Image (cartoon, rainbow, N blue to C red):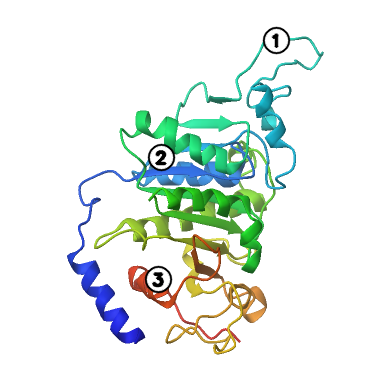
Amino acid sequence: MISMISVLYVLVLLIAPTSFVNAQRKVLLSDDNGWAVAHVRAPYTALKAENYDVLLVAPADDVSSGLFPPFIPILNQRLLQCQFNTCPGLLDPLGLPLGLFPASGSNSTDNRLNYITGLTADAVQKGLQDLSPTAFNSPPDLVLIGVHVGNIKGTSIKSSGIVTAAAAAISQGIPAVVFSGATGSQVSYTTLDSDPNSSTSIAARTYASLVVRLANKLTAPPGPILPPNVGLSVNFPSATNCATASSVKFVLSRLAADPNANDESCTNLRLPLESVVLNANGGSSCLASISVWDVSTKEDADPLAQAAVMFKLLDILTCPNLS
């Protein structure tokens, strides 16, 4: 049955229209660690260098905990400065009123860099509904969220803010991918230049290159970027031993355990667990996991969707010994 599904999907790929042969690819980029962290600005720069038309819309602060931000937009103003003092607040350091400051805004020299006081889902929604029509004259082709600092694996995606945001985009017909990486800290994007050899700067640049590699493959002809109603969750390995993008290989994986699958196999769609991929050979194998999840359940997608993604990404996937 799987082999027939595979054949049918190959046929679909061959006859499906492709919209990116002569067109610039439009990407809405977001994250949950804040609009000014190195791990989101590095992909922004890397995607632009690869000739993507990129619009970044992300929370003004780190909202990965999901705790306090929803209360601030009610006031429609910021009481404090944005992350790393990247936008002013209602009160200056001396506590003197400076006037109302909106709950959203953009960088003064690059209006493709936008912040919003709220959660990642709010940022993605603003990007889709308010900013994309002006920036792109259309919806984006692809929504990319991350790179989140720290891996988000397995069933934990059900409570992940970036997955919730991606699901909202997918529900509106826009394919979406979330990324997380094992290495890094929530530091300002300025450290990419001021401290380029720090572990976070190295990881941010490595992960950014991997984001571009996957985006290039997803948007390449033939066929659609992703099957409908599914998203991808990508986990990058530690950059300590994998400091260059060329050292990292992608493995198609699954979120939850399957009693009928061999955890150390990635053949015949018996996909390995994300944790097995990332921890292979003590974590020294430089493997990144790609899991396909269903938008309605946030669980592993069905075999047809997994097969579709496998054929789309086939020439960048590997099936190593995971023991």
Q: Tell me if 124 is positioned left or right of 62 in this view.
A: left
User: How many marks are shown on the rendered structure?
Assistant: 3
Report the disc number at residue 305: 3
Up the image or down, 107 lies above or below 245; here it is above
| Sequence order check, earlier mark of 3 and 2 | 2
What residue do we see at 61% from left, 52% from top? 148
The answer to which of marks 1 and 2 sits earlier in the sequence is 2
> What residue does disc 2 label?
54
* Residue 22 picture location, percent across and down: 20, 47
Dot 1: element: loop
Disc 2 packing (10 Å; few <14; some 14–19; many ≥20): many
- In the rendering, at what x and y percent does residue 294 appear? 49, 65
- Under mark 1, the amino acid is Leu
Q: Residue furthest front?
A: 296
Determine which of the numbered discs, if any, sits on residue 98 in the image: 1
Q: Residue at x 60, y 38 (%)?
A: 189
Quarter holding the C terminus?
A: bottom right
